[in-house]
Image (spheres, grey):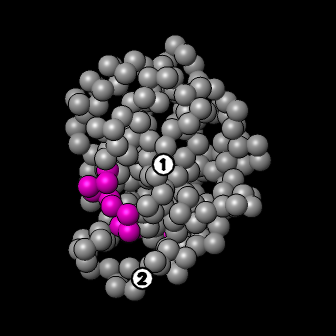
C-alpha cells in the first residue's frame, strides 16, 4: 500500500463530479441490512500513518488499539471508531485506497439512519459495537482527498439520512475482529432483536447511558 498519513491528499484525476456521484449512487443495488462483512480494518498510527490490519483486538477502553483516538487527550467515546459503508466508499474513492478516508472500519452493510439508528448494536467478528449519535461530517481533508463535489455530495441535506460520510461506533464488548469477519445486526432501538444472542449483550455502556 502507498504510504498515507493525516496530510495525504487525493489524485484530482480520480475526483468525480457531483452529478456522476449522485447518478451512480442511484444505480447501486441496496446494501445488506442485517448481515455483512468487514471489508477493511485500519488504524491511524503516529502522524496519522495508515496501517491496514488483518486483525485487531478491539476493547471498550481503547477501541482499535494503537489508533489516533487513543492518543487524543480530548477524545470522546461517541467518536471511538469511524465507520464507512463499502459501496459508498468505493464510489467516492474511485480507485483510490479506502484507507485514505481515515475510517478504522469499512463494512459491507447499510449504514443509513433508517437501518442503524443510534443505539443499534452489531456483532462484528468477536466484538459488539454500538452506533453512537455523533454525526460524522466531511471536512477540508476530505475535500483535499476526494474533491469539492464529493464533499458537497456527502453533505447534501436530502441524502443526510444515508450517512454517506459514515457513522461512529463504540465498543460495547471487546473481542477480536478480522478482515472478512461476519457482521450481524443484533439490536435496533425499540426493543427489536434480530437474533437470539444473550440479552446481556444489549446493556448500554455506562458512558453512553443518558
Residue 122 falls inside the magenta stretch:
yes
| Residue 100 rendering spot, x and y as whole percentages | 58, 35
How packed mark 2 is, by other alpha carbons closer than 10 Å (few <14, some 14-19, many 20 or more), is few
> With respect to residue 193, does 24 lie above or below?
above
Pointer 1: what residue? 136
Q: Residue at x 54, y 46 (%)?
A: 103
* Element under disc 2: loop
Contact between labelled residues 1 and 2, with CB atoms less than 8 Å apart? no
* Element under disc 1: loop
Furthest residue in direction top, as rendered? 13
Residue 7 horizontal side relative to residue 192, left or right: right
| Residue 209 rendering spot, x and y as whole percentages | 47, 78
Q: Which residues are magenta?
A: 112-127
Furthest residue in direction right, as rendered? 46
Pointer 2: what residue? 203
Distance, label 2 to label 1, CA atoms, is 24 Å
Q: Residue at x 59, y 32 (%)?
A: 140
Quadrant in the picture for the N terminus: top right
Earlier sequence position, callout 2 versus callout 1: 1
Question: Which of the two marks, 2 or 1, is nearer to us in this view?
Answer: 1
Q: Residue at x 71, y 42 (%)?
A: 49
Amino acid at each position: 500500500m502507498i504510504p498515507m498519513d493525516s496530510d495525504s491528499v487525493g489524485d484530482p484525476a480520480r475526483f468525480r463530479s457531483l452529478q456522476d456521484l449522485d447518478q451512480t449512487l442511484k444505480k447501486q443495488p441496496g446494501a445488506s441490512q442485517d448481515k455483512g462483512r468487514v471489508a477493511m480494518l485500519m488504524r491511524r498510527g503516529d502522524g496519522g500513518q495508515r496501517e491496514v490490519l488483518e486483525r485487531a483486538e478491539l476493547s471498550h477502553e481503547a477501541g482499535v488499539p494503537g489508533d489516533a483516538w487513543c492518543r487524543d487527550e480530548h477524545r470522546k467515546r461517541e467518536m471511538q471508531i469511524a465507520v464507512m459503508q463499502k459501496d459508498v466508499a468505493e464510489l467516492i474513492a474511485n480507485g483510490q485506497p479506502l484507507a485514505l478516508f481515515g475510517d478504522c472500519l469499512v463494512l459491507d452493510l447499510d449504514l443509513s439512519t433508517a437501518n442503524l439508528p443510534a443505539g443499534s448494536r452489531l456483532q462484528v467478528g468477536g466484538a459488539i459495537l454500538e452506533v453512537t449519535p455523533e454525526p460524522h461530517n466531511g471536512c477540508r481533508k476530505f475535500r483535499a482527498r476526494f474533491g469539492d463535489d464529493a464533499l458537497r455530495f456527502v453533505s447534501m441535506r436530502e441524502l443526510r439520512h444515508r450517512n454517506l460520510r459514515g457513522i461512529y461506533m463504540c465498543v460495547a464488548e471487546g473481542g477480536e475482529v478480522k478482515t472478512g469477519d461476519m457482521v450481524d445486526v443484533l439490536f435496533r432501538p425499540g426493543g427489536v432483536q434480530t437474533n437470539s444472542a444473550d440479552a446481556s449483550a444489549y446493556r448500554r455502556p455506562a458512558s453512553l447511558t443518558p
